[in-house]
Image (cartoon, grey):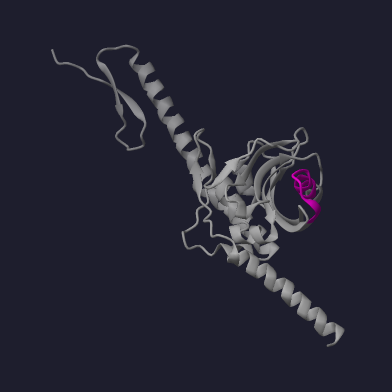
Amino acid sequence: MSRTLILICVIGIIGATQILSAEKLPYQQATGVTDSNGKRILKYWSASNDLHPEMSERYLPDNPAFDGAEVWHIGVRANTLEDIAVGAFTQAGMSDVKLLAHRDGNPIAVAAAASQPQIKMTAVMVEGTLNGKPAQGIGYAFYGLDDDIPGVSAFMAPADVFVALGGHLVPEVHWYLGTTEADHDLIAEGRLSPQQQVDEASLFFSEWVLAYVISLKGIQQQSLQMMQSWSNAMNVCAGDPSCTVSPSADGSGNWEPTISHSGN
């Protein structure tokens, strides 16, 4: 057997092993739930109090079949996008980290969601090693403020676990109200190319902004307007017993004062 053929056979065996190991892991749908503190988290995951430096949250799967998987948010003192991504995953415990792909978030969506207009968001995917095993990670890097350190919200796991749990779906569900169906093909999602995964993650962030953030801001703005119209109407009445405050006839949800005049 030639050396080339031997090499091809070895590569085929390694690839088949990776496929089989992901296929043999349990199916765990990516599902979001609300914990006792009102925080959105992944179902069948639990908070860990063992935090790395600059890490503000860390969650681990309850099922030991997924050992090594984590979702976390961590601050990292770095400037360039690559240094931010590599530094964050390194601080979280991954070694030999390499940035595989990235996709900038839609500037309009990021601006709508961010508290500061200078903030940028980029979806990033990396590979490296966790406890001696090949590993992958994907997440959202937030950066751009001179007076604040960048932060990364991410999911990382050994490569077979990363694939089995759905790759990019995990951070989308944990942080951005994503949902999956009971029969969702998680392995197919986890096996998307790195560029496809960050493209999906970045697009989902924009969809979340449109469906939730902008809608919520619209509701909040409408509520403030309604409260202001109530206050203005009450000021007009100024305690006059013949003056009442009622919804305006235009259907806007605002309020208007009405003064009744009794006949003589």
Quarter assignment of residue 72: top right
Residue occupying the far right of the picture:
3
Give whichever of 261, 97 is nearer the camera. Answer: 97
Question: Is there any visible trace of residue 102 in the rendered image?
Answer: no
Query: What is the quadrant of the N terminus in the image?
Result: bottom right
Residue 165 location in percent, x, y? 59, 57
Looking at the image, which residue is at 78% across and 36% down? Answer: 146
How many marks the image carries: the answer is 0
Question: Is there any visible trace of residue 216 in the rendered image?
Answer: yes
Residue occupying the far bottom of the picture:
1
Give whichever of 177, 111 is nearer the camera. Answer: 177
Looking at the image, which residue is at 71% across and 72% down? Answer: 15
Give the residues in magenta. 84-98
Looking at the image, which residue is at 65% across and 69% down? Answer: 19
Note whether 255 is above or below 178 in the view shown.
above
| Left or right relative to 205: residue 183 | left
Q: Is residue 92 magenta?
A: yes
Q: Is residue 15 magenta?
A: no
Residue 88 location in percent, x, y? 76, 45
Residue 189 location in percent, x, y? 59, 63
Residue occupying the far front of the picture:
64
Residue occupying the far left of the picture:
264
Looking at the image, which residue is at 73% across and 71% down? Answer: 14
Query: What is the quadrant of the C terminus in the image?
Result: top left
Residue 237 location in percent, x, y? 33, 16
Give whichever of 229, 60 is nearer the camera. Answer: 60
